[in-house]
Image (tube, rainbow, N blue to C red):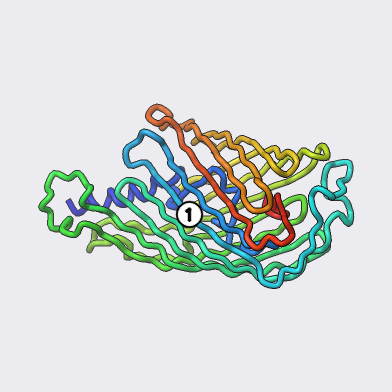
Amino acid sequence: MKRLTAIVLTLVASISGAFAQQRPQYTQYMLNNYLVNPAVGGIESYTDLRTSYRSQWIGVEGAPESFYVTLHSSIGNASTSGSPKARKSNRFGFAGKNSYKKAAPHHGWGGVAQVDRAGLLRSSTLNASYSYHLPVSRYLTLSSGLASGVTNYSISTIEARVPDPNDPYLADNRLNTTKIDLNVGMWLYSPDFFVGLAGTQLLRNQNDFKQGEEPNMTLLPHLYATAGLRFYPSKDVALIPSVMVKATSSASPAIDANLRVMYSQYIWGGASYRHNDAWAVMAGLNLGHLFDVGYSYEVATSEMNQVTAGSHEVVVGFKLNNFRKVVCPQWVW
């Protein structure tokens, strides 16, 4: 019974994301790249508060549910980047010379609170981050970031369906362990593109959920490579293609590709495709300089499409201390 329970813990942990990803996955990650890359912290001139709820695989018992709150801001960010409405583009739709003023060197700070539940397993994460943004030219800025915190993993044995409910291994209603986490990242950005690289779960502990010689759930390092491009085919319309590649040592890389269309900085729509897993449609609104919201509906392309009605995800953001009245983010669009 002990061996069966330990194996179940490992399997449940791995279903929280496709391709053996142990971390929660989000369709609208492009609205909050800070989730996986601490170098994004403090990139804007305002304080970014963002929250999201994701319900994956509707209709499947024990399907993953994820919730997060992130907050990050800058210290000493005297950047006076030009407004996108006033930007002058060249004939290819990219920022023209002198459209944006050079970003200022500054620090960033932030934090992430995240809860993910899949089956009997619940993970709760609390991280704090620091970043530094250094302009390398008038056009390019390079930032690096470090985040650390704790993640608690727990299993609710009281909800388990077992042949022997009197097994002493299940005497406690909840089994849990807490692990210190470490994430690092780099982010190269300009008015027209960004490229990011990050690593998460870099500290490993061989004692996670370990009982003697029984199987254990070892947390695997995750690598994320991200890139995006923004150009204006016309004055009021921006096209934003982006891609993310996720990799672990236990599975082949997973690829997310996205294309969004933004109109007049206030409304956007788009589509996303996750290789061999799902496709999604999404839309959002920037409701003035304080509030924005995004929604996505995802349909599985794997065998899961036979048992699920899809996945829903909502992202809500607040631009606090937004003294410059920024409507559309200048650097993380």
Q: Residue at x 59, y 68 (%)?
A: 109
Position of residue 206 measured from the top left corner of the image (x, y, whole percent)? 35, 65
Q: Residue at x 83, y 61 (%)?
A: 101
In the current view of this chain or complex, which residue is farthest to the top?
306
Crowd class of label 1 (few under 14; some 14 to 19; many from 20; radius 10 Å): many
Question: Which residue is denoted by mark 1 in the rendering?
Answer: 68
Position of residue 129 measured from the top left corner of the image (x, y, whole percent)? 55, 67
The quadrant holding residue 40 is: bottom right
From the viewer's perspective, is residue 319 above or below residue 235?
A: below
Q: Residue at x 83, y 42 (%)?
A: 93
Q: Residue at x 48, y 38 (%)?
A: 312
For the image shown, how many numbered marks are present on the structure? 1
Position of residue 167 measured from the top left corner of the image (x, y, whole percent)? 12, 54
Q: Is residue 107 left or right of residue 298?
A: right
Residue 261 vs residue 47, the one in the foreground: 47
Position of residue 298 measured from the top left corner of the image (x, y, whole percent)? 51, 35
From the viewer's perspective, is residue 46 above or below residue 309?
A: below
Residue 260 vs residue 276, the one in the foreground: 260
Q: Is residue 210 left or right of residue 234?
A: left
From the viewer's perspective, is residue 328 above or below residue 63?
A: below
